[in-house]
Amino acid sequence: MGLLRDSSKVFTGIIAQRVMSFIMIPVIARLLGPKDYGIFNVAAAVCALLGIVAGFAMEASIAVSATEKQAAERTIGTFLLGILCGVFFGVIAYLMQRYLRNYYSTDITNALVLMIPIFIPLGVISTSVQNYVGYLGKFKFFAIADIASPIAQKLQKKKLRTIPEPIVYLLAWCGDLMKFCGIKEPPLSSFRLRNMRADTTGIPLESIKSVTGPLPYSMEQGVEETIGWLRKHDLIK
């Protein structure tokens, strides 16, 4: 029941956030007017694109930190990087005003110059805080590669090989086609790929921790036990 209660709180918060965003759209549009609202949206879209570059995806590494100290250091580092990138892109936008006016109106150009140094750091900081809070509320996170690599090394004495993401999606679509043709269990399908890539780092697990206590196995011990069981039952050599 504790897990259901915590999950329902998160669900309620997400719904409330979406509803408030939906309600505020016509309110902001009415306050700003069609022209200013359009200018704001264009500038916000440009800031969102630059924000992807500003953090250099460092905010994503917070959730997979090895220790709480490392997670805090990465969070602070990402804060500073977001601020520096905001200032950098703000200066670039200021210096390129004349060039930007060839593609945007004067109003949009002025909005970009004002919004970029503010919105980019705020976006990076917001994502970093979310990932840091997610790190504090979960068991140690393992990416699939963190588990698959030691298994591959113990079985084949080789490092795990990787393939480009577009090829993985292509193989998943081929699996969907195989299922459509009557093959029940293709090696990979879109459904399995979605499960593999599902982001579960934000799921609250405090209620589970209070029941289970510390995990009985480390990741390395789990790999050894799994390989031993597979060999015992002649499922692998």
Image (spheres, rainbow, N blue to C red):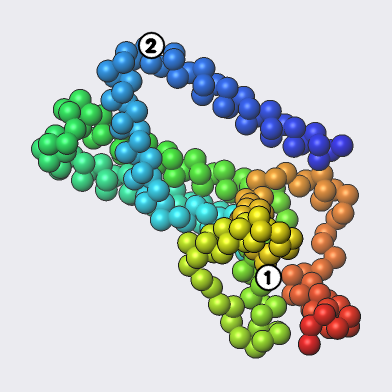
Along the line of sight, the residue nearer the viewer: 92 or 229: 229
Q: Which mark is residue 93?
A: none
Seen at 15% across and 42% down, the residue is: 96
Compared across the picture, whether 60 is left or right of 195 comes to: left
Residue under circle 2? 30
Q: Badge 2, how many Cα within 10 Å: few under 14, some, many 20+?
A: few
Quadrant of the rendering where the C terminus is positioned: bottom right
In the depicted structure, whether residue 218 falls above or below residue 178: below
Residue 148 percent across, percent down from the top left:
66, 72
Residue 90 x, y percent position in the rendering: 25, 41
Left or right for 65, reference 36:
right
Taking depth in this image into account, of 151 and 68 the one nearest to the observer is 151
Amino acid carrying mark 1 in the image? Ile
Q: Nearer the viewer, residue 235 or 119?
A: 235
Which label's residue is closer to the chain start, 1 or 2?
2
Where is residue 168 shown, x and y percent of the image?
54, 64
Which amino acid lies under the numbered mark 2 shown in the image of this protein?
A: Arg
Residue located 16% across and 27% down the image? 106
- The residue indicated by pointer 1 is 147
Provide residue 10's location: percent of width, then percent of height: 69, 34
Residue depicted at x 17% and y 36% = 103
Towards the viewer: 39 or 217 = 39
